[in-house]
Amino acid sequence: MGNLGPTELIIIGIVVLLLFGAKRLPDTAKALGQSLRLFKRETAKLRDEDADATVVKAQAEPAPPQQVTAASSVEDRLRALEEENQRLKAASEPTVNGVPLSQAQKKDQSSS
C-alpha cells in the first residue's frame, strides 16, 4: 500500500496536471512555498518567545522574606506583609505601556 512505483507516480502527476492545469501549478507551488516559509518563521518566533519567557521567569525569583524580630509589633508585621504582597502583585501583574493593567482599565473607564 505504501509502495508507489514510477508508474503510479506518473499517473498521479497526470491527474494533478489535468485537475489544476499547467498554468495554475506554478502559482499553486509558489503559494505553498510562501505559506511554508511563513509557518516556519512564526514557529521560530514562538520558540524564541518561549525561551525568553523561561529566562525571565528564572531571573524573577522572589526575594527571601524579611526576617521579623520578636520585638516587632503586630502592626509592623502586618505592614511588612502588606508591602510584600503589593510588591509581588505588582511584579506579576501584566502591564500596558508600563502602567499596570488594572490602572490602565480604570483610566479608560473614567475617560469614557
Image (cartoon, rainbow, N blue to C red):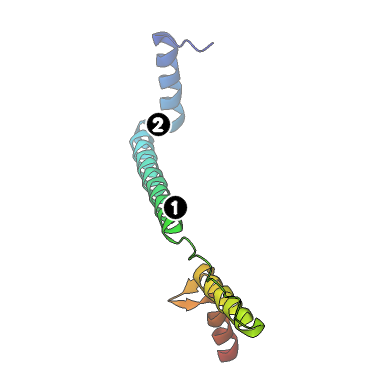
Amino acid type at mark 1:
Thr
Q: Residues within 10 Å of mark 2 (few under 14, many from 20)?
A: few
Front in this rendered view, residue 111 or 70: 70
Q: Is residue 21 above or below residue 63?
A: above
Quarter containing the N terminus: top right
Element marked by disc 1: helix
Q: Which residue does the image show at 57% across and 74% down from the upper left?
A: 68
| Residue lying at the far front of the rendered structure | 71
Return the x and y of residue 96 as percentages of the image width and height. 47, 75
Quarter containing the C terminus: bottom right
Q: Is residue 12 above or below residue 62?
A: above
Q: Which residue is mark 2?
A: 21
Q: Which residue does the image show at 47% across and 79% down from the upper left?
A: 99
Element marked by disc 2: helix
Q: Which residue is mark 1?
A: 54
In the rendered view, does 2 fall on the left or right side of 36?
Answer: right
Q: Which residue does the image show at 34% across and 40% down from the upper left?
A: 30
Q: How many marks?
A: 2
Q: CA distance from mark 2 to mark 1?
A: 49 Å
Frontmost of labels 2 and 1 is: 1
Picture quadrant of residue 98: bottom left
Return the x and y of residue 40 as percentages of the image width and height. 38, 43
Q: Is residue 16 above or below residue 39?
A: above
Q: Is residue 85 above or below residue 62?
A: below
Which callout, 2 or 1, points at the residue further toward the start of the chain? Answer: 2
Return the x and y of residue 2 as percentages of the image width and height. 50, 13
Q: Which residue does the image show at 44% across and 51% down from the upper left?
A: 50
Front in this rendered view, residue 34 or 46: 46
